[in-house]
Structure formats: structure tokens, C-alpha cells
Image (cartoon, rainbow, N blue to C red):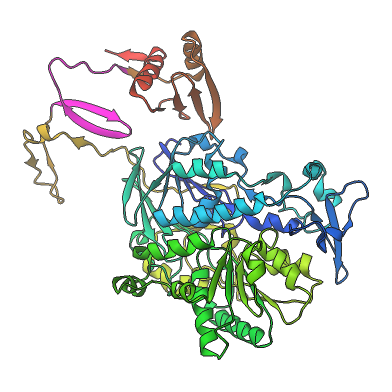
């Protein structure tokens, strides 16, 4: 990478679970960590007990007992009877030890983080806001608890040995399904280790990565504490837009300031639902009232953070306004239910102004606090214990997991599935009914899909947002490179770069041989600047005497002291084989890999990373301890010609 222009790689196959790699010559930044839950739809729902309807399904193979088959409407479905797995970016496609920073935009991205930073040789920085860490932790803890409840036989772990694409029918046999890339969920220890590595960042707080680029978080209105990012150096201004919402909700409004006028705007996570959420919400509330009036239960499989705060407030208010008895309970069942409700109330500074005003009035920002006090909202860790004793019908119940493969929601479906009076309402837009519902298709319970998607949609994007932000160019996942029925692009902006999964594009941009240099205050005192009559920009010039200090990609002219010894200077082209021989001679253990034409040599003792760029005329040494860096510099010097 000889120029100052950046390169951008798309590491995710789904645009609403983004993961991007942004490379500059001396720094690499990962923007979000992708986790795709759609792989879980290929597994059999893991309900409590061994005598459930699903456990009685026929085996698909006579000699392999971990595949269950069922036929619905003349279509055969095959499910893996084992612990469900999630799909993350394969670690063999990215060298995490070369990533200098990870930017976490929202809690869902944080859920994926341990897969990327633990046991991957990642040594960089991680940045996220405090609420993103808090709510991301709760999402992860819920999943860890759900998976720990499962107890599969050891023999069921052998299913990956089969060539599933050849022996099983769709959807497992489809090209985009990659079982070998699916992974078991991580442990609580891995989560804690990842969280300890995060640096907390506030909105509009600027941090510098390796002295090369600045990153700044700007609130994006999607979730409490979620953000977009501005990444810039002296030449390039790259904006990154993750899941963003401009609709009125409980979060602080989106802040567009940082993304305006970007040289490149990376656009991800647009709404997947076609109907506006306001219309779908009206239908959802009507369904809730009609079901309760008929004496039925309403089950809403949902994540324990985010839009659930709005649902609890809206549904309880709608019940009050339509004559439903206050005795109808609202249940929130999750291992983290109590914590998530508490955290929503203590993060008032991250909420919309009207909810902040409630706090100043000594009131709770959310209505669910009052519902807890008067007993209408009841919170349980699981279906066991007190819930089974206190449960009343009809009711509204929020429970996880929206995949319907793990957690209490899947078991409640089995409990309530025999009655048409009951209803299950699917609201998570990234969990399609065609994927999550097949194992329950033969049940009598009514299923309704109201994908409430508050993310920016194409109408908002094309009509107002892009004209306001005015980026010089867009970078979009290839998923958005589509045309309408009239032949027009669905994203009405030009120019743009459409980037496919695992594709890398150069962002071009400006290059220069000039570099910003700081001047020590002692030298400024003696600097005399003379004007240039021909200059139209007020440019002056002067003389300085000192030495140039280059450290961590920062250049500064320092005062020259008479007895100061400057470090040696070298010239020439660094030969990789010659450097290896020099390391061997000094008995320094190392590994050598190639990355996009560059050679990356990692030494153990001293602990350093040496990057030799394509032309051999530029070398970068990364080290935590200055003494170790100096030792490697001496080795490099032995391979070059000293300048007197």
C-alpha cells in the first residue's frame, strides 16, 4: 500500500450485520463485528424436556440420529438436533493481529466481539460508548444463559462430518449456507475478557489511533448509546453509518454533523421492512387488543433491550385506552430482565429530551417503572419457579430468543400452540418468518409478522439524508446495488462503489508527499517568518535549526542540543531474506507472512511486528516497549547502508 489512500473490505454477507475493514498505510480499523443468527434456523428448537413434540420427529437418516425431519404442506424440512450455532466472519479471512482498532456501533455488534478479539491474537484497541457496553453485555449474558441450559448428547456433535450440502434438502443445501463456518457460542469468561479490553468513548469525543487517524463517535438514534463514526486523517474523511434511526423514539436524536461532507460514506444497515413502522405498530396494537378480548395470550419473541422499552409503554397504554382489565398481566421473561429495565432508567443522559425532563422532575424516564411498582409488569428470570405458580391468562409475554430456537419463547410456543385464541407476534425485522417458523407450522396458534424496523429506509435516505450529508461518494454493500421496476437504482446517489462480500476496493483519494509536522514551543519563540509578495494565501517562510523526531507516526522538530546523539540514519531497499538472516543470527524467533504484497514479520522476544511494504523502501515497527523497538531498529540497520 504505497499511497496514502485507504482500502475498504466488506467482511459481511448480510448488510444489516456489518463488518468492514478500513486499511490505511499505517493503521487498520475494523468497523463493527458481524454475527448472523440465521444459521440457528437450521437447528431444531431446543425446548425444555425430552418428551416434547419436536423430539418425537422422525429421523432423516436411519444411521445418523442428529437430523429430524418434518413435512408441512407437502414440503419437507430437516433440522439439526444439536446445540444451535451462530455464523461469524471466518477468522481465516482476516488477520486480527494486524487490526489496530475495532469500533463498536451498537449492542448487537458488541455481542459478536469476543469471537473477534479473544483467541485471535488481536492486540489493538476497542472503542464503544458506555450504554453500548452495558446493553451488549446483557444481550450476551442472556444468550450464554440460554445455551448453558441445553444438554445435548456428545454424539450429536458429529453432524458436521457429513457433507450437508449434498445429503440434505434446502435450505441447508443452499450455496450461501456455510455450516463449517458456524460456531458454538462463547463462554462468560470470554465475554468478561473482551469487555475488559474496551475503551469507553463519549459522543463527539475524538481519539487517535496510532497517531495516524482520528475516530469520533456521533449518536445515531437507533439504540441507547449507539453511534456512527467519523474516521479521518490529514487527507481523508471517511464516514461510517451503521444502524441509524431518525424516527422519534426513546433515544437521543441522530447527530448528522460528523458525517456531513465526508470524502467517502460507508452506508450499511438500512431498513429491511417495506412498510413504515408506524403503520405496522397500529396493526400490532390492534392484534394485541383483539387477542386479549378473546381470552388468548400474546407471545412476543424479542431481544431484552432496545425497542422492548417502547413496546411495554405503548402496549400498556393501549390496554388502558381500550377497556382491557388492569388485571391482565404483562410478563417480561429473561435472565437479564431486571438488569435491562434498571439500566434503561439510569442512562437518562442518553435518552430523548422529554425523558430527560422526567428525571429532572424526580420521575422515572420510562413508564415501565410505574408498571413494576403497581404490579402490572411482572419480571421473571425463566419459566421455572415463581412464574409457573403465578402465571395468569390472558396475558402479554415478552421472552427470548427471537430465533425461536433457544430460550423461553420456544417453550411457550409449545405450551400455547394448541389454541387458536393465542397469538405469537414476530417483530424483529432480521428474523424472517420463513426461517424461524417452519418447526411450528403445524401448531394451531396464530402467527403474525409485524417487522417494526426503525432504521433509515430508502425513502428517507434518498429524499432528505443524502442531500443533507452531501458525501463526495458512497460505499455500499452489493446487496443495495439493485434497481426499481422503472430501472432506477434503489439508492439514488452517484458516484458510489458497490462492494461484494470479501471484496476489497481502493478508496482512491488524495495523495501527497507532504506531512504535517509539529514544532517545539522553544523553537517557535525564535522563528522569524517573512512574507511572500507573490503568494495569494498569506504563506510565509522562515528558518529553523533542530532535529526531526519521528515516533508513532507523529513528526516534531525538536531543539538541537550540542551534546545530543541522534539515532543512526540508513538508506537502501530492505531485503526480507537478509532481515530473516539477521534475526536468525541474533536468535530472535519470528514468523513471516504476506498480506496484500507486504511482508509482516512478528517477533516473540522482543515482541514486535515489522511490516515491510511492497517496494521495500518503507518499513513500520510496532512495539509496546521502546527498548524492544530500538533493538529491532538496530537489526534493520544491519541490513541497510548507514548515512554518515
Q: Position of residue 135 (x, y in %)?
A: 48, 57
Quarter of the C terminus within the rendering: top left
Residue that lies at the very extreme toward the bottom in this rendered image? 323
| Residue appearing at x 73%, y 82% in the figure | 421
**Location of residue 527 (image quadrant):** top left
Whether residue 561 is in magenta: the answer is yes
- Stretch of the chain drawn in magenta: 545-569
Q: Nearer the viewer, residue 251 or 21?
A: 251
Residue that lies at the very extreme toward the right in this rendered image? 62
Q: Position of residue 237 (x, y in %)?
A: 36, 52
Q: Nearer the viewer, residue 116 or 309?
A: 309
Q: Is residue 326 above or below residue 146?
A: below
Q: Position of residue 516 (x, y in %)?
A: 25, 39
**Location of residue 54 (image quadrant):** bottom right
| Residue appearing at x 10%, y 32% in the figure | 522
Q: Nearer the viewer, residue 104 or 341?
A: 341
Tell whether 560 sits left or right of 447.
left
Q: How many marks?
A: 0
Q: Kindly tell me whether residue 243 is visible in this rendering.
A: no
Q: Nearer the viewer, residue 146 or 457?
A: 146
| Residue appearing at x 31%, y 45% in the figure | 234
Q: Is residue 546 above or below residue 587?
A: below
Whether residue 341 is in magenta: the answer is no
Q: Kindly tell me whether residue 202 is visible in this rendering.
A: yes
Tell whether 131 sits left or right of 38.
left
Q: Position of residue 579 (x, y in %)?
A: 47, 16
Tell whether 79 sits left or right of 256.
right
Q: Is residue 238 above or below residue 296?
A: above
Amino acid at each position: 500500500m504505497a499511497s496514502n489512500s485507504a482500502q475498504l473490505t466488506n467482511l459481511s454477507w448480510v448488510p444489516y450485520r456489518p463488518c468492514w475493514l478500513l486499511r490505511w498505510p499505517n493503521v487498520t480499523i475494523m468497523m463493527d463485528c458481524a454475527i448472523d443468527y440465521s444459521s440457528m434456523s437450521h437447528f431444531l428448537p431446543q425446548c425444555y424436556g425430552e418428551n416434547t413434540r419436536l423430539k418425537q420427529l422422525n429421523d432423516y437418516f436411519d444411521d445418523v440420529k442428529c437430523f429430524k425431519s418434518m413435512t408441512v404442506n407437502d414440503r419437507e424440512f430437516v433440522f439439526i438436533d444439536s446445540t444451535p450455532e451462530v455464523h461469524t466472519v471466518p477468522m481465516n479471512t482476516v488477520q486480527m493481529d494486524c487490526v489496530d482498532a475495532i469500533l463498536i456501533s451498537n449492542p448487537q455488534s458488541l455481542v459478536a466481539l469476543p469471537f473477534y478479539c479473544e483467541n485471535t491474537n488481536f492486540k489493538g484497541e476497542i472503542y464503544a460508548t458506555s450504554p453500548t457496553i452495558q446493553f451488549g453485555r446483557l444481550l450476551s449474558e442472556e444468550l450464554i444463559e440460554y445455551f448453558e441450559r441445553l444438554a445435548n448428547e456428545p454424539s450429536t456433535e458429529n453432524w458436521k462430518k457429513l457433507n450437508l450440502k449434498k445429503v440434505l434438502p434446502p435450505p441447508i443445501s443452499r450455496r450461501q449456507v456455510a455450516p463449517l463456518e458456524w460456531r458454538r457460542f462463547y463462554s462468560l469468561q470470554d465475554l468478561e475478557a473482551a469487555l475488559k479490553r474496551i475503551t469507553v468513548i463519549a459522543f463527539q469525543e475524538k481519539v487517535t489511533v496510532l497517531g495516524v487517524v482520528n475516530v469520533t463517535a456521533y449518536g445515531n438514534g437507533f439504540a441507547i448509546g449507539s453511534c456512527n463514526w467519523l474516521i479521518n486523517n490529514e487527507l481523508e474523511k471517511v464516514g461510517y453509518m451503521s444502524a441509524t434511526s431518525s424516527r422519534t423514539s426513546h433515544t437521543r436524536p441522530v447527530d448528522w454533523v460528523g458525517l456531513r461532507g465526508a470524502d467517502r460514506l460507508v452506508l450499511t444497515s438500512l431498513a429491511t421492512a417495506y412498510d413504515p413502522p408506524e403503520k405496522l405498530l397500529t396493526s400490532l396494537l390492534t392484534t394485541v387488543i383483539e387477542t386479549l378480548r378473546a381470552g388468548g395470550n400474546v407471545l412476543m419473541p424479542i431481544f431484552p433491550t432496545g425497542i422492548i422499552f417502547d413496546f411495554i409503554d405503548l402496549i400498556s397504554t393501549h390496554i388502558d385506552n381500550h377497556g382491557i382489565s388492569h388485571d391482565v398481566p404483562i410478563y417480561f421473561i429473561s435472565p437479564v430482565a431486571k438488569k435491562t429495565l434498571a439500566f434503561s432508567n439510569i442512562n437518562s443522559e442518553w435518552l430523548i429530551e422529554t425523558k430527560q425532563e422526567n428525571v429532572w422532575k424526580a420521575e422515572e424516564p420510562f413508564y415501565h417503572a410505574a408498571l413494576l411498582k403497581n404490579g402490572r409488569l411482572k419480571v421473571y428470570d425463566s419459566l421455572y419457579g415463581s412464574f409457573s405458580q403465578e402465571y395468569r391468562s390472558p396475558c402479554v409475554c415478552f421472552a427470548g430468543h427471537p430465533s425461536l430456537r433457544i430460550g423461553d419463547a420456544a417453550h411457550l410456543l409449545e405450551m400455547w400452540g394448541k389454541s387458536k385464541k393465542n397469538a405469537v407476534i414476530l417483530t424483529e425485522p432480521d428474523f424472517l418468518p420463513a426461517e424461524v417458523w417452519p418447526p411450528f407450522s403445524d401448531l394451531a396458534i396464530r402467527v403474525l409478522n409485524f417487522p417494526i424496523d426503525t432504521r433509515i429506509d430508502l425513502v428517507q435516505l434518498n429524499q432528505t439524508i443524502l442531500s443533507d450529508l452531501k458525501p463526495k461518494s458512497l460505499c455500499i454493500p452489493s446487496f443495495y446495488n439493485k434497481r426499481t421496476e422503472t430501472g432506477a437504482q434503489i439508492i439514488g446517489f452517484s458516484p458510489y462503489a458497490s462492494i461484494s462480500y470479501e471484496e476489497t476496493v481502493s478508496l482512491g483519494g488524495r495523495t501527497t508527499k507532504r506531512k504535517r509536522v509539529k514544532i517545539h514551543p522553544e523553537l517557535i519563540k525564535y522563528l522569524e517568518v517573512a512574507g511572500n509578495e507573490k503568494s495569494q494565501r498569506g504563506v510565509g517562510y522562515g528558518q529553523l535549526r533542530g532535529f526531526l523526531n519521528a515516533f508513532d507516526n507523529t513528526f516534531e522538530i525538536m531543539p538541537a542540543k550540542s551534546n545530543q546523539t541522534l539515532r543512526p540514519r540508513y538508506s537502501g531497499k530492505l531485503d526480507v531474506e537478509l532481515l530473516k538472516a539477521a534475526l536468525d543470527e541474533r536468535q530472535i524467533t519470528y514468523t513471516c507472512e504476506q498480506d496484500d504484497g507486504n511482508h509482516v514479520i512478528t517477533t516473540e522476544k522482543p515482541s514486535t511486528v515489522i511490516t515491510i511494504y511492497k517496494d521495500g523502501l518503507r518499513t513500520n515497527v510496532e512495539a509496546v516497549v521502546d527498548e524492544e523497538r530500538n533493538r529491532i531498529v538496530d537489526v534493520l540497520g544491519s541490513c541497510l547502508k548507514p548515512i554518515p
